[in-house]
Amino acid sequence: MRALDRIALILGLGFLYAPILILVIYSFNASALVTVWGGFSTRWYGVLVADVPLREAAGVSLIVALASSALATMFGTLAALALDRGGRFAGRRLFTGLIYAPLVMPEVITGLSLLLLFVGFGLDRGLLTLVVAHATLGLGFVAVIVGARLRGLDRSLEEAAADLGANPARVFATVTLPLIAPSLAAAFLLAFTLSLDDLVIASFVSGPGATTLPMRLYSQVRLGVNPEINAASTLLVGTVTAIVLTASWLTGRRGVA
Amino acid sequence: MRRLLPVLPALWLAAFVLMPVILTLKISLSTPATAQPPYLPVLDWSAGIEGWDSFLEALDFTNFETLASDALYRDAALSSVTLAAIATAILALIGTPIALAMARARERWQPLLVALLIVPFWTSFLIRIYAWIAILKPEGLLSAGLMKLGLIAQPLEILNTQGAVLIGLTYAYLPFMVLPLYAVLTKLDPRLPEAAADLGAGPARVFWSVTLPLARPGLAAGALLCFVPMVGEFIIPDLLGGSDTLMLGRVLWSEFFSNRDWPLASAVAILVLVLVVGPLILFRDGEATAKEPSR
C-alpha cells in the first residue's frame, strides 16, 4: 500500500512539474530551436531585457495587480466580516452567491459581461477598467481565505477585550485585525497573482495602450514557441513561486488553502 | 455598525457581478449593428416610458434560435460538455489515488505536499499550457522520446487534436480535483477502513465499500470545480486544440473579437451560464458537507 501511495505521489507531482521544468531548462538553451539542445546560454534573458514592449506590459501588469489586489483585499475582507459577523441580513443568500460567482464563472463570461457594463456606461477601456475587473475577480478569493480564518478565530479574545472596556473599533483594531493579518497578507498575494496571471478577462476589458504581460505573451505564443517566452516564463514562475512560499509561510504551516 | 458591514461589498458586487450578467442577458436578446456600441436597441433614457416600450419590443430570441439551429454552435456546445465530462472523469480516476496517498502520508509531510500541489496552480496558466506545445508538437519532446525508445516510428500527430485538449484540461485542473478530495480524506476517521480490514475486507473492498463512499462529497466538489470552468475554457482549446476543436469559450471569443457580434457572444455566455448553473443547483445539497473546497 505504501509503495503504491509513493508511486501515485511521484507520478502526480511529476506530471504537474515536468512541463514547467522543461520550460525552465530550455530557457537556458543556446539554440533558437526550442526542442534542440544547443548548450547552456543566457542569451534569451538578454533578448528579454531588451524587449521594450514586453517590459512596458510587465509595468502595466504590476500597476494593475497592485491596485486591484489592494481593492480586492479591502472589499473581500469586508465581505468576509459581513458573512461571519453580520448576522442575518436581507439578501444574504444573493450576497453569498455573488461573492462566489466569479470563482466558478468561466473567465470568458466574467470578461464579456464586465466589458458590456463598461461600454454600456461609456467608460473608456484601460487601466481603470482592468483594475475594477481584477478587483472583482480577487474579491471572492479574498473572502474565502479571510472567512476561513475568521471562522477559526477564538471569539473569547474579542469578548475579553470588550469586557475590559474596549469599544468595538478598538477591539477590531487591537485584537481582530492582528489575528487575521496573516490571512489578509496571503489573500492579498493570491489576488495579486491572479491579476498578474489573467489573460482572458484582461483581453476583454483592456483598451489600447493598456496591454498586460499575459496579453503580450499570448500574442507571441500564438506565433509559435519561442525561447524568449521561455525566459519570460521562467522569471514569472520564479516570482510566483517566491510569492507562494511567502504566503504559505505567512499563513503558518497549514498551507495557503 | 454591524449592519453596515455588508453595504460596501454588496454595492461593489451588485455593480460589477450582478449588473454585468443582467446586461449580458439583455444584449443576448439584441440585434448586432454597425454602431457604437455594436448592438441594437440601445435604451433611450430620455424617452421615458415610451422609450422602454420600443426598447422591450425590439428584444427577441433570434440569437438563441441561431445557436439552436446552426450546427457549428450545437457541435461546440456538445464538444465542450463532452470534453469537460471526459476530463472530469479522468481527473477523478487519477486524482483519487493522489489525494489518498497525500492523506495517508506522514502528518509532517502533508503541508509540504499540499504546497507542492498549489504552486503550479499559482503559476501562470497561459505559460503552463504553452509548455505543453513544446512537448506535444510532432518534433517535440514526447515524440522524440517515444521514437528513441522505439515505441513509435512516426512523430505523434497529437497537438491540435481533442486529445491534446484533454491532456491540457487534465493537467491544468488536477489540483482542483485533488485538493477537495484530500480535504475530505484527511478528515476521514482512519479507524473505519481499519475496522473493515479487521473484519476481513481486502484492500480493494475497503476502498470500494468504505473509503470511496466517505470521500464522495470531496469527489463531487472536485468534479464541480473542474467541470464548470472547463465548459467555458478558452486558453486550452485555443493553444492545444487547433482549428478543429470548437469549445463554447472559444466560440464566444471569436464571435466577440473576430466577428464583432456582441449579441451572439452574449447569447453564448448565457448558454454557458445555464450549463453551469444547472450543475451548481444540483450540487447545492452536497454543499454543506464539502464547504468551500480550497481553490
Image (cartoon, coloured by chain):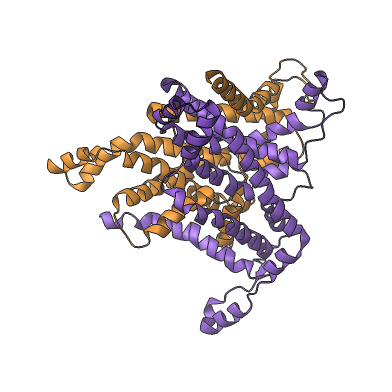
Specify whether A211 is left or right of A63: right
Indicate the quadrant where residue A248 lies. top left
Residue B5, percent across and down?
31, 54
Residue A140, percent across and down?
45, 47
Considering depth in this image, is B275 or A214 the residue closer to the camera?
B275
Indicate the quadrant where residue B107 lies. top left
The residue furthest right is: B153
Q: Is residue A38 above or below residue B40?
A: above
Considering depth in this image, is B250 or A127 the residue closer to the camera?
B250
The residue furthest left is: A164
Considering depth in this image, is B216 or A246 the residue closer to the camera?
B216
The residue furthest top is: A39
The residue furthest bottom is: B50
Indicate the quadrant where residue A30 lies. top right
Q: Is residue A214 above or below residue A24?
A: below
- The residue sitting at 55% across, 33% down in the picture is B96
Residue B81, percent across and down?
66, 51
- The residue sitting at 61% across, 35% down in the picture is B93
Give the tally of numbered discs.
0
Q: Is residue B217 above or below residue B276?
A: above
Q: Which chain is orange?
A: A
Q: Which chain is purple?
A: B
Residue A220, percent across and down?
72, 38
Q: Locate the C terminus of chain A and report the quarter of the image it occupies.
A: top left
Specify whether A17 is left or right of A70: right
Q: Is residue B163 visible?
A: yes
Q: Is residue A209 visible?
A: no
Specify whether A173 is left or right of A229: left
Specify whether A147 is left or right of A218: left
